[in-house]
Image (cartoon, rainbow, N blue to C red):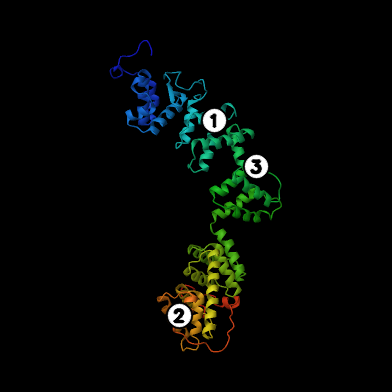
Amino acid sequence: MSFCSYAEGDAMRGTTAIANMFIMEYLPSAPADYVKVYLFGLLLCRHPEVCESMEKLGEVLHLDDNTVKNAFSYWEREGAVIRQSDNPPTYSFITLAPGNDGSDKTDDGVYENRDYIKTLQSMMPSLILENHELRIANDWLDTLRLDKDTVYLMVRTEVEKRGNRLPAAKTMFKHLDEVAIKWAEAGATNVEKAREYLARNSATANTARSVIKRFNQKREPTVDEIEMARVWLEDWKYTEEQILAACEETTKGERPSFAYLNSVLEGKRNNPDSELFEKVKKLNTHLIISTRPSPSQIESLKAFLQMGFEFEAIEQAAVQCGEHNRNRYEDIAKKLTQWQKAGTYTVADIEEERKQRKYFSDIMTKVFENAGIDSRVTDADLKTIRLWTALIDKDAVLLAAESAHGTDNPIKYIDKIIKTWSASGINTLEKAKAAVQKGAPQKKNPNKILNERTVTEDEFSDGFYADIMNGEGLDSK
């Protein structure tokens, strides 16, 4: 215990000096709770007996422990305090005066370049940068020799990649440190060289390389060419596939170039229908139409796209129309209308619906054979079989069909059996067989064997405009 000390209770009667620099430079931008912590900390510098721990300080100020901890970390970053120990945490308050505001280098080097640290913190407001992160940040300047503006560019680039969804501070700075080392090794220590480095390693650079490859050239793209690729992708919203497709118009010349490709893409951009024109040419090829795409055909394609179809699905409709000698855009429209009713807008949707339709067609064909029905499967039949198989198993449906053989109206008879079985909880083949043995409705099958068959692809495609969901079309060609 020191020889002299303040009398008990003197803290209440005394005063605590606050530097004008704190009031004018620090206070305006500091969070209110952090100011409370700082001011009480100043008091404790003269009267430590008032509060013996950080936890106690939180109780006195009615703040939670995290707020107190974050407050000291904040003032540490601002250069107003210096951490002396971690367990327990202790701090020394710096006397704030001109020439001693934390911008000068301290013993551990953490507070050098206060504005630099403050800028980094503002770029990552969701993170609390502590001693560990501050040391790494200073190493980028002192050890790797990156200049401040280059560090800012690096951090901004990495933050934007994550859409401001940043990981914990230690994780983020571990990654930033790895990036900083790569930049330093590549010589990207100033902004100009850093921008060149970013250009060489960006997605736009890869697109530029693909263009050069399409030109049958073997070289790296220049910075200007990479910038052109960036404009095409980001500003003009072209995809890489569209850019490479446009290369076909440049390779007709002796020396294809980025400048020529840029003029081609700019022309397409200024004429929104130019891309549609090329797509209509594809559709016309499938429809075996040899004339130049007309304005009405372009408008038809626009209408198809507005219906929600991807172009590949529209193209598939044109292929099917052409295969069946239906060579008008009205034929495509009919086909798409049926697909729209079935909720199929993509090639994947259409293929899945085709498989489902084929599956139910095969089942209904077997139902007809078991029931002795000599007829084609219509869309109405497909609707019926979907309902029946939703009520009972497929094999039980086929057993019901056998029971209907020889009746005046087999379909009506099957429907009655299935609904009776379903209402009684008979939904499997085993249960259906048991019901038949107990005398459930049944008609004995004549003594003949019917060969099972499936619907062939040719038969299946006969229902060209089939509307599967509404039971129309398969029986009308």
Q: CA distance from mark 1 to mark 3?
A: 33 Å
Nearest the viewer among 69 and 195 is 69
Q: Quadrant of the C terminus?
A: bottom right
Q: Is residue 378 visible?
A: no
Residue 397, image x, y percentages: 49, 78
Rendered position, 207 above or below 320:
above
The residue carrying pointer 3 sits among few (fewer than 14), some (14 to 19) or many (20 or more) residues within 10 Å by Cα, namely some
The residue identified by callout 1 is 136
Residue at 51% from the left image edge and 79% from the top image edge: 398
Residue 82 location, x and y as percent?
Answer: 45, 23
In the rendered structure, find residue 299 and report the number of the disc placed on it.
none
Q: Residue at x 30, y 14 (%)?
A: 7
Mark 3 or mark 2, which is nearer the start of the sequence?
3
Q: Which mark is residue 222?
A: 3
Q: Nearer the viewer, residue 431 or 249?
A: 431
Q: Residues within 10 Å of mark 2 (few under 14, many from 20)?
A: some
Circle number at residue 435? 2
Q: Amino acid at mark 3?
A: Thr
Residue 342: percent from the left, percent from the top? Answer: 48, 69
Asked if the residue at tag 2 contacts the one at tag 1, i.e. Cβ–Cβ closer than 8 Å, the answer is no
Any part of residue 339 in sight: yes
Under circle 2, the secondary element is helix
**Label 1's element?**
helix
